[in-house]
């Protein structure tokens, strides 16, 4: 059965700053009934399609009065999700727009296993229109977001988690360089890049603080002209210099945009960076954005390699995404080196 109206949602898997119009396929009644029981609301649950692929973990719950976004998670992800939600709720109390669950997390029986249902209000998202005015506004919002995060009482705990993660990635880096860890298809590429870059450079950077960790067009929502930050699952291991977060925005919102000329990409990137620096004058960024970009992509490739070594399933599209971003940074090397 097909949902009558198209649902506009951001793409979590695409690099491009756009919304995906998708149609939801109605789920099995057993799962839908369980969501109705959790919420105490009658409604219909629909699978969501991301880039024409049906997701078994993300759903749209349509009721008479309100719509909801449902996320099903494995038990091993539960602590990470709970930590993410705790940070999100803390931020909302500090005046940052976030999206938090409407109901307690409850178990759901699926065909294969028990999963945990996290149910959020569904916000209709608008894309950020890229112009100098919006770039400045977005940059100031991010600076304020970081200022609030810097006050979080668990900053030292997040830093400890991040250092432990970086040590793990350093071991993976060493194993790949010595050919003791074979990463099918992508290992040779990573080994080649390790001649010029090392995760140690990230470890050595100062001015660390809690960051979002995965800012992209799916984790920044625009609703009623307000910016919402969502999905803080990577924050636990993202106590880093804020320049690494600025790189995410420049990369994911500006460089990947095929509709922008090189000149506009340069103008928007420099404006975004300078506006942020002027909003947080206590910070000192020494590394050029080109090197920051390379190190951040390397970190992501090493994380995927870490998962591979632990036999945690990874999708080839994730690997290909970061290879694409690496080549994209080469294409914009002069532009990125001009930002410092």
Image (cartoon, grey):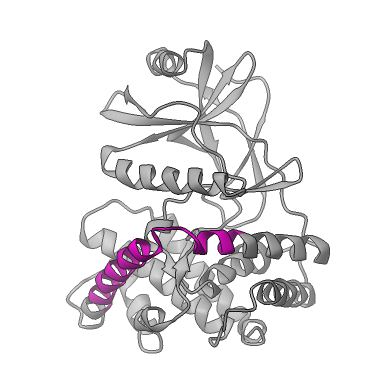
Spot occupied by residue 266 in the image (x, y as percentages of width and height): 73, 77
Spot occupied by residue 187 in the image (x, y as percentages of width and height): 31, 73
The residue at the point 26 percent across, 28 percent down is 112
- Of residue 99 and residue 9, the one placed in the foreground of this image is 99
Spot occupied by residue 211 in the image (x, y as percentages of width and height): 49, 62
- Of residue 7 and residue 70, the one placed in the foreground of this image is 70
Q: Quadrant of the C terminus?
A: bottom right
> Does the magenta-highlighted stretch encompass residue 153?
yes
The residue at the point 64 percent across, 35 percent down is 123
> Magenta span: helix, strand or loop, mainly?
helix
> Does the magenta-highlighted stretch encompass residue 218?
no
- Horizontal side of 228 relative to 202 (left or right) equals right
Q: Which residues are magenta?
A: 145-173
Spot occupied by residue 236 in the image (x, y as percentages of width and height): 38, 57
Q: Quadrant of residue 282?
A: bottom right
- Of residue 325 and residue 281, the one placed in the foreground of this image is 281
Residue ranking furthest to the left: 180
Residue 190 to residue 306: above or below:
below
Residue 210 to residue 327: above or below:
above
- Horizontal side of 57 relative to 245 (left or right) equals left
Q: Quadrant of the N terminus?
A: top right
The residue at the point 28 percent across, 59 percent down is 307
């Amino acid at each position: 059965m097909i949902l009558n109206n198209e649902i506009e949602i951001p793409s979590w898997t695409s690099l491009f700053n756009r919304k995906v119009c998708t149609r939801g396929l109605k789920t099995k009644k057993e799962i839908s009934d369980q969501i109705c029981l959790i919420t105490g609301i009658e409604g219909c649950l629909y699978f969501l399609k991301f880039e024409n692929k049906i997701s078994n973990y993300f759903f749209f719950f349509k009721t008479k009065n309100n719509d909801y976004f449902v996320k099903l998670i494995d038990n091993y992800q539960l602590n990470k999700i709970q930590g993410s939600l705790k940070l999100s709720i803390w931020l909302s109390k500090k005046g940052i727009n976030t999206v938090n669950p409407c109901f307690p997390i409850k178990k759901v029986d699926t065909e294969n296993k028990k999963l945990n249902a996290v149910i959020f209000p569904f916000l209709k998202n608008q894309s950020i229109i890229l112009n100098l005015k919006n770039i400045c506004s977005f940059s100031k919002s991010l600076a304020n977001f970081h200022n609030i995060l810097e006050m979080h009482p668990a900053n030292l705990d997040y830093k400890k988690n991040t250092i432990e993660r970086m040590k793990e990635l350093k071991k993976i880096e060493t194993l790949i360089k010595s050919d003791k860890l074979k990463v099918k298809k992508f290992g040779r590429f990573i080994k080649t890049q390790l001649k010029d870059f090392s995760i140690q450079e990230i470890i050595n950077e100062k001015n660390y603080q809690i960051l979002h960790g995965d800012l992209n067009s799916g984790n920044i929502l625009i609703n009623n002209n307000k910016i919402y930050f969502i999905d803080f699952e990577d924050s636990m291991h993202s106590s880093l210099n804020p320049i690494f977060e600025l790189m995410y925005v420049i990369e994911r919102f500006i460089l990947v945009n095929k509709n922008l000329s090189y000149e506009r990409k340069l103008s928007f990137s420099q404006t975004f960076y300078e506006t942020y620096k002027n909003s947080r004058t206590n910070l000192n960024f020494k590394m050029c954005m080109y090197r920051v970009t390379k190190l951040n992509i390397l970190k992501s490739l090493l994380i995927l390699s870490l998962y591979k070594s632990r036999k945690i399933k990874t999708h080839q599209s994730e690997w290909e995404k970061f290879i694409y971003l690496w080549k994209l940074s080469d294409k914009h090397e002069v532009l990125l080196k001009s930002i410092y």
